[in-house]
Amino acid sequence: MSIRATSTQTMFQARRDLVVVRRIIIIIVILLTLGFPYVIFILISFVTKPPKYHLRAAIFLVDLSQTLIMIAVFKFCQPVMDVILKYKRMVSSRVQPTMT
């Protein structure tokens, strides 16, 4: 066996670790992208008078980022996704009684 050969288990674990790192990076990018305007509003409020309704815009962006993070977590976490899909199939396959 060659010294440079890697086992299948090592490759599988490396791929799994890369998937986890990729998911963490996606969540961080979502938070940074949608949280950046909030930080700008805070910095503007320290220096000058902030624009009108700045808190509404900031809170909207924070809510949007939290929603996208929840969607990303549901997408990345397979057991949670299985429960959601199972519930969705259960709701759509119910038999509705009718009056005749």
Image: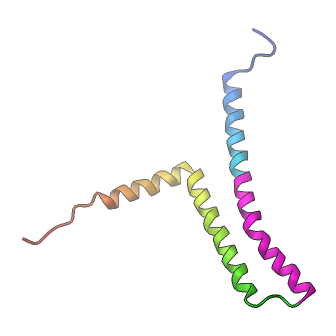
Q: In the picture, residue 40 is in which quadrant?
A: bottom right
Place of residue 99 in the rendered image (x, y in percent of width and height, measured from the top left): 10, 72
The residue drawn where x is 46% and y is 57% is 84
The residue drawn where x is 69% and y is 85% is 56
Give 73 or 34, whichever is nearer the viewer.
34
Relative height, residue 61 to residue 89 (above, below)? below
Give 92 or 40, whichever is nearer the viewer.
40
Q: Residue furthest top?
A: 1
| Horizontal relation, residue 39 to residue 65: left or right | right
Q: In the picture, residue 58 is in which quadrant?
A: bottom right
Q: Judge whether residue 2 is colored magenta.
A: no
Place of residue 10 in the rendered image (x, y in percent of width and height, measured from the top left): 71, 27
| Horizontal relation, residue 77 to residue 23: left or right | left
Span of residues in magenta: 25-48
Q: Residue furthest right?
A: 47
Q: Which quadrant of the figure contains the C terminus? A: bottom left
